[in-house]
């Protein structure tokens, strides 16, 4: 079965039509499905429409948040409720085309656990399209997973992916990256994209700044999430060594001047090198102790239990 999870934030005009299009596409292709609408604190009629749809159709269910918690939270609630072996996430605003569902399933059958959409011909304003290209390129460079459209609202993934990766904040954009980092096979297919007809986009320009900070978080989590001291400790050791080298040099000068009288006397207390060395030593010690604190947190978190991802097992009963 396919579970279709749809985060909804003030999308009242689109819901009934979206449901109709999903039904049309799935029944034509004989796909067994359920739809889970997650109302992320809408202030319009979205919830009563969802409740109405769910009343009339066994395959439709709804979850209503008390307030707006964000798309990642809505998707997490949807993944927890999903019963299907495969999960498809789809925006509620009709920009994603349910006609694409069979192609996603066909692609996954080639041996992929994540199939990401790619809005090849994108129908959004230019101030979204261009920053988005830069962003996708940066993700590719920093994480090694080169996809054209990481932020695409249309993604299919296996339920194993949903149970292993934990998205929070605005990390929903990084589902393919986080999955790939755990060894799942990720691919993409071009999808048909439609302009928004009703309502308005919930994200502005600020998303790119946040997206960039999230990218740094994800790069750190993937690379050093289980061994933060390897990064912070390395930075710390470097600065510490630079500081100690500066102090050693100044000490040698002082000994040369005051004990062996080999050099003409000059004060060392006013030299810029002294200030730099002091700063470097403190910085180094701080980075190292931060790294130790981070290690302490990692050692004590639940997340630490699943540092690996099992593909399959053979054993004797
Ligand atoms: N959404 C949500 N919670 C939010 C913001 C957005 O559930 O806080 C939903 C929204 O209703 C839509 C999807 O996430 O179904 C994508 O949002 P939007 O279309 O505004 O993003 P864009 O297409 O502009 O990237
Ligand atoms: Mg949209």
Image (spheres, grey):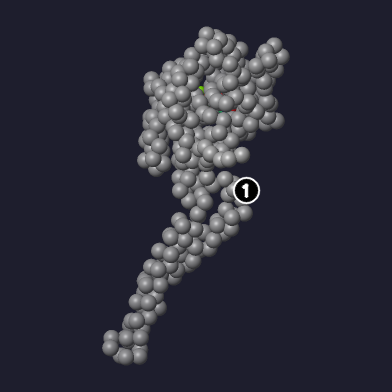
Give above or below for 130 relative to 34. Answer: below
List x then y, in percent, for residue 125: 42, 23
Q: Secondary structure at mark 1?
A: helix
List x then y, in percent, for residue 270: 38, 76
Badge count: 1
Residue 243 picture quarter: bottom left
Give the residue drawn at x 47%, y 45%.
Answer: 222
Give the residue drawn at x 51%, y 11%.
Answer: 29
For ligand 1, tell me if the residue under mark 1 lies within 8 Å.
no
Residue 34 picture quarter: top right
Q: Which quadrant is the C terminus positioned in? A: top right
Mark 1 surroundings within 10 Å by alpha-carbon count, few (fewer than 14), some (14 through 19), many (20 or more): few
User: As drawn, which residue projects farthest toward the bottom?
Assistant: 260
Q: Quadrant of ligand 1?
A: top right
Q: Is residue 209 in view?
A: no
List x then y, in percent, for residue 7: 59, 25
Residue 131 picture quarter: top left
Q: Relative to the observer, which residue lies in front, 118 or 216?
A: 118
Give the residue drawn at x 56%, y 38%.
Answer: 164
Q: Is residue 43 left or right of residue 259?
A: right
Q: Which quadrant is the N terminus positioned in? A: top right
Q: Relative to the observer, which residue lies in front, 62 or 71?
A: 62
List x then y, in percent, for residue 141: 37, 40
Q: Which residue is mark 1?
A: 302
Q: Is residue 182 in view?
A: yes
Give above or below for 20 relative to 222. Answer: above
User: As drawn, which residue projects farthest toward the front?
Assistant: 316
Give the residue drawn at x 65%, y 17%.
Answer: 60
């Amino acid at each position: 079965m396919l579970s279709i999870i749809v985060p909804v934030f003030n999308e009242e005009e689109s819901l009934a039509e979206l449901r109709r299009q999903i039904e049309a596409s799935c029944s034509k292709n004989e796909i067994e499905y359920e739809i889970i609408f997650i109302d992320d604190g809408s202030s319009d009629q979205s919830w009563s429409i969802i409740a109405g749809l769910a009343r009339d159709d066994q395959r439709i269910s709804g979850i209503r948040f008390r307030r707006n918690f964000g798309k990642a939270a809505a998707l997490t609630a949807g993944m927890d409720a999903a019963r299907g072996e495969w999960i498809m996430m789809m925006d509620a605003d009709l920009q994603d085309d349910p006609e694409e569902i069979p192609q996603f399933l066909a692609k996954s059958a080639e041996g992929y656990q994540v199939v990401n959409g790619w809005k090849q011909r994108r129908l959004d304003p230019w101030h979204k399209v261009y920053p988005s290209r830069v962003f996708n390129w940066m993700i590719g460079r920093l994480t090694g997973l080169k996809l054209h459209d990481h932020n695409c609202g249309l993604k299919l993934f296996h339920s194993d992916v949903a149970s292993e990766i934990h998205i929070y904040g605005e990390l929903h954009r990084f589902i393919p990256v986080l999955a790939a980092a755990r060894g799942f096979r990720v691919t993409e297919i071009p999808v048909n994209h439609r302009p928004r007809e009703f309502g308005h986009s919930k994200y502005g320009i600020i998303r790119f700044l946040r997206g960039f900070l999230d990218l740094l978080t994800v790069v750190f989590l993937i690379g050093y999430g289980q061994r933060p001291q390897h990064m912070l400790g390395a930075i710390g050791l470097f600065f510490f060594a630079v500081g100690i080298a500066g102090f050693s040099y100044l000490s040698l000068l002082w000994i040369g001047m005051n004990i062996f009288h080999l050099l003409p006397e000059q004060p060392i207390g006013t030299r810029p090198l002294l200030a730099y060395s002091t700063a470097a030593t403190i910085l180094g010690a701080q980075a190292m102790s931060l790294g130790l604190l981070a290690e302490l947190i990692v050692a004590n978190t639940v997340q630490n239990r699943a540092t690996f991802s099992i593909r399959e097992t053979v054993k004797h009963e």
